[in-house]
Image (spheres, grey):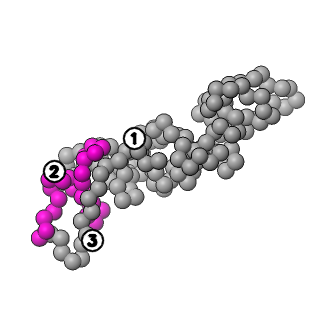
Amino acid sequence: MVNSQAPGVPPAPRSCAGCGGKIADRFLLFSMERYWHTRCLKCSCCQAQLGDIGTTCYSKGGMILCRSDYIRLFGHSGACSACGQSIPANEMVMRAQGNVYHLKCFSCATCRNRLMPGDRFHYINGTIFCEHDRPGAALLNSHLPQLQSNSVLTDQKVC
């Protein structure tokens, strides 16, 4: 994100990617190959004006995000919790219990079937099980946390 002002020469009016209006302000923002009024470049989740809170912004899944919301949604490391490999910024992800996964890695530990948005799953000691393969009551002894049922969400449903 660049806050730019043409030195000494008034810039030609540009259109704002946020509101579509002409930018006649003294300052403008340039982010994601587009120009913005400083008031129009906002985080898709918290609505913070990104020019006011820093010099960077993040984009993923059609959302524009501040650093805090990006980390909240996609994790600190940007790595898949299953395979440990990097997750590119433009890739869709699955999330469970604060962990982030590649779509292909979000699968049942028993049958290896990939879980899709809307599928029910169980998360036990960091392991994902589909509804069919969840461990039975005999496996759930007192040292395991209580079985948790969750619905899978993609990154576009979290804000």
Q: Amino acid at mark 1?
A: Met
Task: Bin the neighbour count of mark 2 within 10 Å (Cα to Cα): few under 14, some 14-19, many 20 and up.
Answer: few
Q: Is residue 131 magenta?
A: yes
Location of residue 28 by image quarter: top right
Relative to 68, is 144 above or below?
A: below
Quote the CA–CA distance across marks 3 and 2.
22 Å
Question: Relative to residue 97, is residue 54 drawn left or right?
Answer: right
User: Farthest residue toward the right?
Assistant: 8
Relative to 103, is 10 above or below?
A: above
Q: Amino acid at mark 3?
A: Pro
Q: Disc 2 designates what residue?
A: 111
Return the mark for residue 145: 3
Question: Relative to residue 97, is residue 53 drawn left or right?
Answer: right
Q: Secondary structure at mark 1?
A: loop
Return the mark for residue 55: none
Return the mark for residue 92: 1
Q: Quadrant of the N terminus?
A: top right
Earlier sequence position, callout 3 versus callout 2: 2
Query: x and y percent of residue 152 in the render?
Result: 31, 49
Q: Secondary structure at mark 3?
A: loop
Residue at 66% across, 29% down: 16
Q: Cβ–Cβ below 8 Å for labels 3 and 1?
A: no
